[in-house]
Image: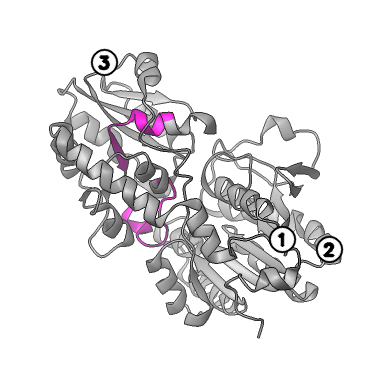
Amino acid sequence: MKILIYSANFAPEPTGIGKYSGEMAEWLAAHGHNVRVVCSLPYYPQWKLDPAYAGRAYRRDTWRNVSVWRAPIWVPASPTGIKRVLHLLSFAIASLPLMVRQLFWRPDLVLTVAPAFVCAPMGWLAARLAGARAWLHLQDFEVDLAFNMGLLRSKPVRGIVLRLERFMLRRFDQVSSISTRMVETLQRKGVPKARTRYFPNWVDVSRIHPGFDGDAFRVQLGIPADSVVVLFSGSMGGKQGLMAIPAAASLLSARSDIVFVVSGEGVMKPALQSAAADLPNVRFLPLQPIERLGELLCFGDIHLLPQNEDATDLVLPSKLCGMLSSGRPVITMSRPGTELHAVVSQCGLVVLPDDTSALAAAVVKLADDRAARGELGKRARAYAEHHFEIDLVLARLFGSGARTQSAAASENLVVPASS
C-alpha cells in the first residue's frame, strides 16, 4: 500500500511519539509498503529545534527507505497552557501545504497520529480528497489531559472542545489507541466499537533484553557493584508525577546501598535537579543514544514509573515496554482498576499516586529481596514478549507479508471500509 503517516513527532527523535512513529514507518517500508511521512522538524525531548535541521523552514529527506517531508514548528521555552496549544497549532498550519501536495500521490491510507489532535481535521480531509482510508491513532487524550492537569481551565471552552473532538473522532474510518482502557474511552466518546482498535506501543525484544549489564554506567557514576540502582529513564514531562522520585529518595537518604538514577531530558528536568541537589543518593544522566538503550535499562535493578493521577488511563507510558523487556521489576504509582495497575501488578509493585512513603517502602522491599526482583523480572520479560513485541503488534494491525499490489495489501489491514 501507499501509506501516508501524518505525525508532528518523528525520527530521529529518540523518545516518545517520534520514536514510535519512526519505528512504525521503518517496519512498514521493510514489509513492502510505500511510506511517506509529514512531520515537524525534530525538537523533542529537549524542546529545542535540532541544530542539524537549522537553516531551512521546510525540508525533505529519506530516512530508512521512507520519504520524509518536514514542516517548521514553533517551540516555546516553557510549553505550558496556551503555549502548548499554539505550539501544536503552528505545525498544523505549517504542514498544510505538504499535506495538499501528498494528494497528488494518491495514498491508500492516511494515518494521523495524535498528539497533535489539531492535525486530525487535515488528516481526515486529505484521506477523503485522496479517496484513501482515514485512520486516527491517539497516543494520549491531550484534550482531557490539558483540562485535568489545569493547563487549560475554562469550562465553556472545555465543553466546546470536547464536542468538536467527539465530532472529529466519529469521522474517521478507524480510531486506535494504546491501551484497552483508552479504547473504551474512545467508545464512550462516541466512536462505534467496530471502528476502534487496540494498538499498543511496542518494543524490539531482540534489542532490549536481560543479557546486557550496566557496569559502564556504574563506573561512570561511581556506584558500587553491590548497590541497588533504582532507575527512571525517558522523557521528563509534567504528566508523569516525577517529583515523587526526589521525595522518595529523600526518605531513603540514609540507605547508602540504594541509588536513584534519573536519565533523560524534558521540561521537568531542571525542577528534578533542583529538588535533588542536596541528596547524596540521586544521580543524573543525559539522554542516551538509542544504541545504548538496552545497556541503560539493564543498568537498573528496579525501574520507577511514577504517573500523575490526573493522567490516569488518558495515557499509558510508552517507556513501560522497554522496562519490561529488560527483565527488571517495575514500581509504578497507579490506582486499582487502571491499565497501568493491571499490567505492573503482574511483574512489579504498585502504590497509590502521590504516596511517596509507599513508594519508598516499595523500593526498600525489592532492594532487600534479590530473589523477588529476579522472579518479577522474569515475569516482566515474558509479558513484553507476549504482548509488546514489535512484529507481533504491527503484524496484527498491518499484516506480516509484503505485497506488490495495494489491493492485496489492504486485505491484511484491519481498517473498515469508508462509510
Q: Which mark is residue 224?
A: 3
**Residue located beneath label 1 in the image:** 4
- x and y, in percent, of residue 399 in the image: 58, 64
> Is residue 90 in sight in this rendering?
no
Where is 252 relative to 45, above or below?
above
Q: Which residue is found at the position 60% from the left and 79% from the top? A: 416
Q: Tag 3: residue type?
A: Pro
Callout 1: SS: strand
Q: Which residue is found at the position 37% from the left and 67% from the top? A: 181
How far apart are the two marked residues, 2 and 3, measured between alpha carbons? Answer: 57 Å
Callout 3: SS: loop
**Front one among 322 and 53:** 322
Where is 318 relative to 52, above or below?
below
- x and y, in percent, of residue 170 in the image: 57, 79
Crowd rating for badge 1 (residues with CA inside 10 Å; few <14, some 14–19, many 20+): many
The earlier-in-sequence mark between 1 and 3 is 1
**Front one among 55 and 410:** 410
Q: Tag 2: residue type?
A: Trp
Where is 106 relative to 223, above or below?
below
Crowd rating for badge 2 (residues with CA inside 10 Å; few <14, some 14–19, many 20+): few
How far apart are the two marked residues, 1 and 3, measured between alpha carbons? Answer: 49 Å
- x and y, in percent, of residue 118 in the image: 63, 63
**Front one among 219 and 235:** 219
Query: Mark 1 near mark 2, Cβ–Cβ under 8 Å?
Result: yes
How far apart are the two marked residues, 1 and 2, measured between alpha carbons? Answer: 9 Å
